[in-house]
């Protein structure tokens, strides 16, 4: 008959050896999370700024086109009248 405890012990040892390459210390892991959080916050802030700049550009563009259209219309009225 197979000794279950011996098998479990052997499996634990194999897993420990195999997983050792993936081990990371707690403090380092925490620092990685803080770094990723900082990147995420920076990207979200950037998206907000980019959105505001894009919306402002569109609004200013529409206003500029309207003003140029009105000025052109007034010039035509003066020249043609």
Image (cartoon, rainbow, N blue to C red):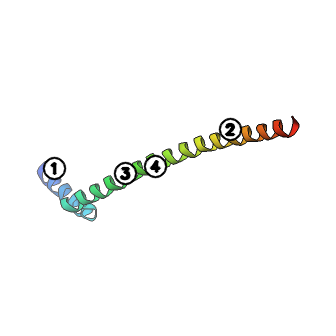
Disc 4 is placed on an element classified as: helix
Q: How far apart are marks 2 and 3 (CA)?
A: 39 Å
Q: Determine which quarter of the picture holds residue 22.
A: bottom left
Q: How far apart are marks 3 and 4 (CA)?
A: 14 Å
Disc 2 is placed on an element classified as: helix
Query: Which residue is found at the position 68% from the left and 38% from the top?
Result: 66
Q: Looking at this view, name the residue that lies furthest to the right.
A: 80
Residue bearing the label numbered 2: 66
Picture coordinates of residue 80, whole percent (x, y)? 88, 37
Q: How far apart are marks 1 and 3 (CA)?
A: 52 Å
Whether 61 is drawn above or below 13: the answer is above
Residue depth check, mark 2 versus mark 4: number of the one nearer the observer:
2
Please state which of residues 38 and 29 is positioned toward the viewer in this rendering.
38
Q: Determine which quarter of the picture holds residue 34.
A: bottom left
**Whether label 4 touches label 1, CB < 8 Å:** no
Q: Distance between the residues labelled 2 and 1?
A: 87 Å
Residue bearing the label numbered 3: 40
Q: In this view, does 58 lie to the left or right of 66?
A: left
Query: Which residue is found at the position 58% from the left and 40% from the top?
Result: 59
Disc 1 is placed on an element classified as: loop
Q: Which of marks 3 and 4 is nearer the N terminus?
A: 3
**Whether label 1 touches label 3, CB < 8 Å:** no
Whether 11 is drawn above or below 58: the answer is below
Residue bearing the label numbered 4: 49
Q: In this view, does 79 lie to the left or right of 3?
A: right
**Whether label 2 touches label 4, CB < 8 Å:** no
Query: Which residue is found at the position 63% from the left and 40% from the top?
Result: 63
Categorize mark 2 by other alpha carbons within 10 Å: few (<14), some (14-19), many (20+): few
Residue bearing the label numbered 1: 2
């Amino acid at each position: 008959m197979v000794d279950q405890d011996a098998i479990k012990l052997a499996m634990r040892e194999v897993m420990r050896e195999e997983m050792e390459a993936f081990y990371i210390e707690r403090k380092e892991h925490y620092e990685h999370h803080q770094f990723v959080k900082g990147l995420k916050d920076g990207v979200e802030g950037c998206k907000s700024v980019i959105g505001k700049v894009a919306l402002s550009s569109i609004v200013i563009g529409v206003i500029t086109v309207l003003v140029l259209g009105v000025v052109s219309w007034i010039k035509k009225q003066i020249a043609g009248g």
